[in-house]
Image (cartoon, rainbow, N blue to C red):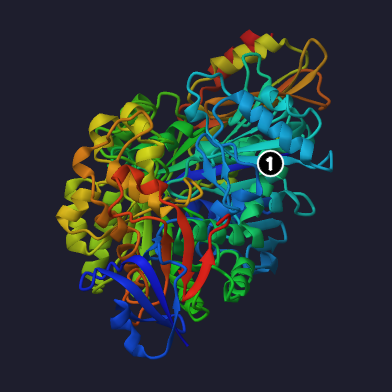
Amino acid sequence: MIAFTVIGGYLGAGKTTLLNHLLANSEDKRIGLLINDFGEINIDADLIASKTDSQINLTNGCVCCTLVDGFHVAIDQLCEVEPPLEQIVVEASGVADVHNLAQYGHGPDMQLDAVLVVADAETIQAKAKDKYVAGTIQRQLRAADLIILNKTDLLSDSRVAAVLAWLQHDFPEARVFCTSRARVPLPLLLGIHDLERPMTTSDHPHAHYATWHFEQASPVTRESVDEFLAGLNASVLRAKGFARLQDGTAVTIQVVGRRSEIETTDKDISGVQLVAIGLADLLDNEALDKLARSRFA
Amino acid sequence: MITVFEARKVITMNPSNPVATHVAVRDGMILGVGSLEEVSGWGDYELDTTFRDKVLTPGFVEAHAHVMAGGMMSFPYLGYYDRPLPDGSIAPGIRSYEQLIETLKAVDAAMDDPEEQLVAGGFDPIYFPDQPRLTRHHLDEVSRTRPIYLHHASGHLATVNTAMLEVNGVTRDLKVEGLGRDASGELDGELREPVAMGLCKTGMRAVQFSNSTPQALSNFAALACNAGITTCTDLAGAAILAPKQHRLWQDMTTDENFPMRVIQYNIAAIPGESADFQALADQFVELKQTESERYRFPGVKFVLDGSIQGFSALIMEPGYFSGEDHGQLLTVPEQLKSWLMPFHEAGLSIHMHCNGNQTQQLALETIEQILIEAPRPDHRHVITHAQLTTQAQLRKMAKLGLCANFFANHIWYWGDQHYDITVGPERANQLEPCASALREGVSFSIHSDAGVTPLGCLHTMWCAVNRVTPSGRVLGEAEKISPEQALKAVTIDAAYQLHLDHEIGSLEAGKKADFAVLDDDPLSVEPMQIKDIGVWGTVLGGRKFKAAGR
C-alpha cells in the first residue's frame, strides 16, 4: 500500500513553501512528489541521483512532473519506482478540485492518507467570495481533511480569530491548523508513522501542537472504536493506532481531521495503542483519557 | 497547365465579385474567377466540366474540430443521432438499449479473437432520461467473457461490462468515488470521471491511443472531404506534448493525396496545469519552422473551463437554471495573463476555450490587460465556444479586436436541454448569439467541435440559420443569421481567425484553388434544406477529391 496525500490550496497560499519544507525534512521516508513544474521547488543537489524530463530520482524517493502525460501516467510511473515508495504527495494546481484528485488515493494498492488544503489567512475569506473562484475555493475547503491556515503571523490575533470563526461557521466540519511560513510538523503533513515517536521538538521548533498517548492491554469491541472516534472533537488533527477486537481481528485506526478509517491489519497487538496530535492550547489530554477509558474499559 | 473549372454557379465570398461560372487554376492557385470569356485570357487551358451542374463555394473551413473525430471512428458508434462515417455511409442513431445491445452483439460476433476487448463510443445517457442508467448487466447481455468499454460522448463517463471490471481487477472494495454502484453497493459498471475510468485501464488507454494512429488522421481527413471541408483545425493539438504524433502527421500531410489542410492549435500544457510558458512559446515559434502547405501552426489553445451540459462551465449570476453548479476555471485568474503573454508577444494567435460567460469575462479582462501592456494590432485572438456571450461582452470584444467562434451545433444537439435544464429559456434563446455579433461588429465563425458533434459545415450553417431544436422549438428567433452570413462564417471569416484569409476562404485571383463542390446552392435552397445538400467532394489546391460513396 502506498499512502496518498494531496496538497491543495490557492495561488500564494504557501504550497511551494510547504513542499520545500517537506523535501528538506523527510529524509527517512521514501516519498514520490508529483508537482506541475520543477522550476518552483528547491531540491538539494546532493539528493539528486538521476534526472529526466519528467522525473528526478532522489536518494530517498523521486519527484515527477505531471505536465507531459497527465496524472494517470505520472501516478503509474510513481507506483513502479524501485524500491517502492512509501508515500505519494501530489501538489494540486491552485484551482484543482482536490476531492477529485483524492480519488486516486482509493485506487488499487493505494491508501488515501489526507487532503490538506493550505489557505492564506489574509485572503482566504475574500477568495471564497471572488466572482471567479468562489466555487473553487469553497469546494477545496469542503474537501480538506485538514486546513492549514498559513501566514497567521501577518494578522492580529483578533483577525485570526475572526477567520477561524468564519471557517467554523461556513465549514463546520473543518479541522484547522494555524501556522506561518507553512511550518507544519511532518507527522501532521505525512501522517503518524511511528507510534513510539510521533514527533519531537526538532520536527518543529515553534509548534503549537501537543500529543496524546493511550495504551491498554485488553481487546475491545468494534462498536467501542466507532464510539471513540465519534467522540473526538476538532482539537484532534490526526490520530493513529491499532486495536485488537474481541472477535480476534486486529485493526488500524487512522484519523485525519474529520475523516477516520478503520481497516483490518495483521499487526500483532493484544489491546489498544493510540496516538493523537492536535493544537497545543486545545488538545485536552484529560478529556481524551476519559473518552478512551469510558469506551474501551 | 491551366484548368478552367466550369460550374452551374460559383459563390466566391469575394464581395467585389460575388458570383461567377468559371474558375481558372494553375499549380493549385486561382488565376481568375468570372465568365469563361473573362478567365480564358490567361492562356491555353483545359476545360473541366465535371462540376457543370454543381455549385462551387470556397472550400469550407472548420475552425474548431479535433482529430478525435477520426480517432473515435476506430470504434463502433452508439450515439443517439445519425453520424456520417469516413466511408460515406451513415451510422444510425441508437434510440433504445435493445438497439444498443443488438448493435454490440453484431460487433462481438464479427470479432475473431474471443479475448479481444470491445471498445465503443458515442453513447450519451442525457438522451435516455426515462430509462434507468445503462449498467454492466446490459453489456453483459452482449458478452460475459469479452471485456467491453463503452466510452460516453461527453468524454467524462464510461460504462463497462463485468468482464472489463474483472480483467482490470476492479472490485467493490475499491472506494474510488466515481465507481457507480447499485443499491446494495455492488459495482454497476458506470465509471465517472478520469480516476474511475482509468481503473479500467485497458479500455481507457485504447480510447486515448486511438487519436495517435495514422487511421485517426486519415479518417478525420475523409470525414472532412465528405463534408466539403478543405481546411480543418485540430484545436487541441498534441504536436508539442507528443512530438511523435507531429512527425507522423508531417509525413501524412506531405502526401499529395492527403485531402485537407490541417491547422493545428496545440495545447501547451495539460489544462489547468502551470508550466514554463515562456519556454513553451519559444517552442511554438520553432514549430512554425516546420510548417508546410497542408500542416500549419498559427497559435496556441488554452482550455479555461468545462462544459455547460456538464455544469462545469463557469457562468455568470444567476447561474445554472437547475442542477448543481460545478463551474470550474482551469486557470488561476491572477496567473492567466502570465500564461498568455509569451504567446501574444511571440506573435502567435491564442484560442481560448470558454464555455461559460464568467470564464469568458476573465479572458476578456485578461486580454485587455495584455493589450494595454503589449499592444499588438490585428492579433485576432479567439474566444472559442463563446456560447453564452453577453451583449456587453460582444461590445468589449469588438473594441479589443477579439473574434468569436460559436458552437452553433449546440443549438440542435443540446438546445432543448439548455432551455429546460441548464441555463433556462432566456439564456438558451441567446445561445451562440451570431446575429448580435454581427450587430456589434465581432468577426465570428461557427463550429462543430467534432468529434463532440459530427463534422459538417452545412449542418453547422443550418443550425445558425434556423436555430431549431429536436423538439421543434426555435431557439432565439432574434439570433438567426442569413444563409450568406452563415456561409461567410464557415469560409472567409473562419479563415480570418486562423490568419489565413489572404490564402483561403474565398475564391479570388492569387488564392488557393480550394472548393467545396455542392449539389445545390446553399444560398437559394429553403433554409431548412441547407443541411441536406449533397456534397460531391472538394477541390484542394486544384486537385479533385471525390467524397466517399460518390
Report which residue position mark 1 lands on: B119
Is residue B480 at least partly visible in the picture?
yes
Q: Name the residue nearer the viewer: A227 or B441.
A: B441
Total number of numbered discs in the rendering: 1
Label 1 crowding class (10 Å Cα cut-off): few <14, some 14-19, many 20+?
many
Residue kind at label 1, given as amino acid type: Val
Q: Is residue A116 above or below residue B173?
A: below
| Foreground of the two, A48 or B359 | B359
Residue at x 62%, y 66% (from the top left corner): B245
Q: Within the image, what quadrant is residue B445 found in? A: bottom left
**x, y percentage for residue A233?**
50, 20
Considering every residue shown, the one lying at the far bottom of the view is B43
Chain letter of disc 1 in the image: B
Q: Nearer the viewer, residue A226 or B160?
A: B160
Residue occupying the point 70% across, 12% down: A222
Q: Quadrant of the C terminus of chain B?
A: bottom right
**What is the x, y in percent for residue A172?**
41, 23
